[in-house]
Amino acid sequence: MSATLTLPEPIAPPRTRPWRTLFAVMFTTSWAGNQFSPLLLLYQERQHYSTAAVNGFLGVYVCGLVPAFLLSGALSDRYGRRPVMFAGVLAAVAASTALAFGESGPLMICLGRFLAGITVGTATCVGTAWMKELSQWPHDPAADTGAGARRATLSFSLGSLAGAGVAGLIAQWGPWPEQLPFLVHVALTLPFAWLVLRAPETATMAGVPGPLRSRLRVRAAGHRRFTRVVLVGGPWVFAASAIGYGYLPVLLKDATAGWGIAYATLLTSVALAGSAAVQPLAKRIDQRDSARGVLAGVVTIVAGVALVAASAHWQSWPLGVAAAVLVGAGMGIGMVSGLLEVQRIAGPADLAGLTGVFYAVSYLGFASPALLAAVAAATGAPATALLLGVVAVGAVCALAVVRSYRRHLPH
């Protein structure tokens, strides 16, 4: 007597793939995180904040990001992807509402940036794990193994690009530049609070009793491949964005006097467009049996930071655009390669948790402008010298990845 194993029928018909709904939700939540970057010069010009203060606003963002990365994955494993993602969408609306009142003082700006960090931390951690689960059988049987990582990264890049582009254009040429960008985002985001509740739940352990403390322990985070390759390359992903289009416009404010906000928007758009465009190539660069993808991302980003140093030294805005292209490409390669490494290392029970750890470490790089500004204020060192120091640290990290290039591969 023989038995045959039959696969379940696909849950979603071809034209209603549920990953598309999640893609849209991640798009709007990513918008919340990056709409602030082009407005740094606006706050300097209108509210007379110092360079250290505006870079400090970027640092507050990280304060919301890291806890969200570390907690949201475990919460979504325990209670389900849907309710945690729904909370992330509500946080996006609250963040933009607070930032719309930014003229009232730094407290509202810090509150808005903190909530934006919670938004993006939740959306990227839970959303990336959920996207992978919706990009495979039985929800999307035609998808390949890397589709989830590519879709999650592309939604993040396009949402960040749209948020920065719309906010920057309104700030430079539109009415109510300190309010309208955030009100536009609130209007776009509110419908998705309802749509996210319609996506299918995929957390296999949701509702299973057990202490949350045990779920916060991500055992795969101790995997040697993760600690010696992924964690080494991770911080460079968002150090690239923070330096390439967050810090550089402030360094070139004299060279771009009169159109600094538009230039900051241009850098952000170019970098994020480059990040999105390079992602199909990033999948081909990545290899299961080596760290080629992670290494390519780090090397490209470090080369971009060197170009940032050159543009700051010569006060050259065209060189700054070229630097943004390079750091954007490195960011795209590093993000896709890092997520693919995470998905190969993690098991189903700790995918969301390990994704959160990866993003938490990666977003530490977003605090680099605040750190550089603080060091410059304390030591009087020129920005060019500090950026060359960052390049030297990047070279050391690249060598560390080379050392573990084909080691500690997950089975």
Image (tube, rainbow, N blue to C red):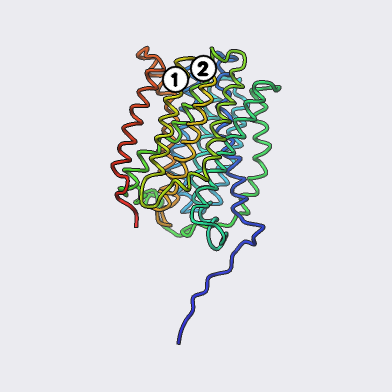
| Whether label 1 touches label 2, CB < 8 Å | yes
- In the rendered image, the quadrant that contains the N terminus is bottom left
- In the rendered image, the quadrant that contains the C terminus is bottom left
Task: Out of 108 and 184, give the one closest to the viewer.
Answer: 184
Where residue 184 appears, as percent x and y from the top left, is 68, 33
Q: Is residue 91 visible?
A: no
Residue under the point 51% across and 37% down: 118
Nearest to N terminus: mark 1 or mark 2:
1
* Position of 323 relative to 79 (above/below): above
Residue under the point 57% across and 30% down: 270
Instruction: Give the structural element (helix, strand or loop) at label 2.
Output: loop
Q: Is residue 269 visible?
A: yes
In the drawing, what numbered circle is on residue 66? none
Label 1 amino acid? Ala
Query: Quarter of the image holding residue 301?
Result: top left
Where residue 347 appears, as percent x and y from the top left, is 40, 56
Q: Among all residues in the image, which is located at the extreme right?
A: 175
Direction from residue 234 to residue 147 in the image, left or right = right
Task: Out of 297 and 164, give the one closest to the viewer.
Answer: 297
Where residue 232 appears, as percent x and y from the top left, is 35, 38
User: Disc 1 marks which residue?
Assistant: 310
Q: Residues within 10 Å of mark 1 (few under 14, many from 20)?
A: some
Label 2 amino acid? Ser
User: What separation in Å lies between label 1 and label 2 (alpha carbons)?
Assistant: 8 Å
In the drawing, what numbered circle is on residue 316? 2
Q: Residues within 10 Å of mark 2 (few under 14, many from 20)?
A: some
Direction from residue 400 to residue 330 in the image, left or right = right
Instruction: Give the structural element (helix, strand or loop) at label 1.
Output: helix
Residue under the point 65% across and 34% down: 185
* Position of 379 relative to 10 (above/below): above
